[in-house]
Amino acid sequence: MKKICLLLVFFISFSLVAQVNKPFYQSIVAGVSYDTVLFNLQKLQALGVKSPGSAAITNTKNWLISKYQQFGYTNIVGSNFSYSGNTLTNLVVTKTGDLYPNTYLIVDGHYDSKTGTGTNDNGSGVAIVLEIARLLANVNTHYSIKFINFSGEESGLLGSQDYVDNVMTPQNQNILLVFNIDEVGGVAGQTNNTVTCENDQSSPTANNATSALYTDTLSQAVLVYSNLLTTFNYAYGSDYVPFQQAGKIITGLFETNQSTYPHTTGDNLAHLDTSYVFEIAKASTGAALYFAKAWDNITAVEVASAKALVKVFPNPFSDAICLTNGSGEMLDVVIWDIGGKEICRLNLAANTETICKLSDCTGGFYVLDVVNQKGEVVDRMKLLRTR
């Protein structure tokens, strides 16, 4: 649910992490399918007007559940709440991370509509969330992901507010970032070559600077993984607002050419740009991979540079490795086998040297992650045991 807003806020580009372009991520983004995105848009339109209490919104919820099940997800929860005598459902699908299973990237898009079928507002966002979920189903991520399709957005952000009040807060969920995708269909017949990246500029202000960092990184992902340009605006009028008001970090995408058809019967495929939705799906997939810290076992791990925060010797190794932390800060080291199983975890005090015995490991490749005290993976290298 958006109201026309003409004020665009630009800020100097700086990034959470300077580089988002990774060959492995590119290989996943290449799997984004125009035909799949189009099919999902067509299906969402055919399901009808998804107003509270309608058969259409129930049918849409059930269809979404079947899609996530087809992708292989099993942790699918319907979180119910009441509105005007009707039971509405937020659909929450959880993919568990291997390093930080209790820290969540939320990727969301509301599935209810107002007056019309909502093919743009917000079928476009739902189609993209589905495509991200499809492509990341079997990809390792360090952070957990919650794919959430909120209901009741058009009635006043009801679903997201209920989630914040009755799920997130009571469970004390640790939210890394809320990535909101709402109305990204563009305008048919116009040149839709720019997407708006939205950042937090509202009170409370404690997370505004971090939101700006994540949003700049989101902009970089758009530029790297799609053929679109970016502009910036403040976040408003969509499901990230209750999270923002609860002090969580948010970012989001919104169409730059604003359609006049949302909340009318004209919000349909004829009035949006499906190629634009496809490009945003690519950008969003790349961003989600980066935010969740996706990794591909061993084939695309990044080998640490000569300036690595933690030095490892020897590599290849036989029974043990020596780890030297010369960074001046406390760091954690986590070693994984190629199946993603954690082999060992060590805490390295600043400017210390530690011996890590790995004699129980079989011969082959392993991955070593260096993690700072903020929980961020700041370096990665490939290890080889020779016997």
Image: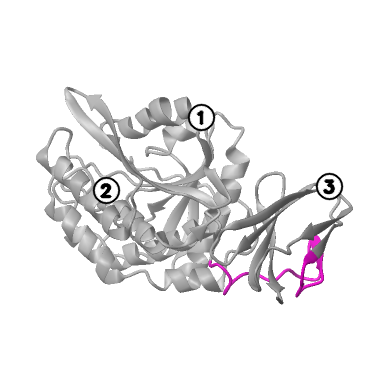
Helix, strand or loop at mark 1: loop
Q: Which residue is mark 1?
A: 172
Please say if 322 is above or below 216.
Answer: below
Report the coloring of the rendering.
Answer: one colour
Q: Which residue is mark 2?
A: 121
**The C terminus lies in which quarter of the figure?**
bottom right
Side (left or right) of 186 relative to 366: left
Tag 3: amino acid: Ala
Q: CA distance from mark 3 to mark 2?
A: 51 Å
Side (left or right) of 156 relative to 287: left
Residue at horizontal 35%, vertical 64%? 192
Does the magenta-highlighted stretch encompass residue 275?
A: no
Q: Position of residue 139 (x, y in %)?
A: 46, 62
Residue at horizontal 22%, vertical 25%? 83
Residue in front for this viewpoint, 142 or 33? 142
Q: Nearer the viewer, mark 2 or mark 1?
A: 1
Q: Position of residue 225 (x, y in %)?
A: 48, 68
Q: Which residue is mark 3?
A: 349
Report the number of discs.
3
Q: CA distance from mark 2 to mark 1?
A: 30 Å
Helix, strand or loop at mark 3: loop
Please say if 206 is above or below 379.
Answer: above
Side (left or right) of 176 relative to 133: right
Residues rendered magenta in the picture: 296-320
**The N terminus lies in which quarter of the figure?**
top left
Q: Main secondary structure of the magenta part?
A: loop
Which is more N-terminal, label 1 or label 2?
2
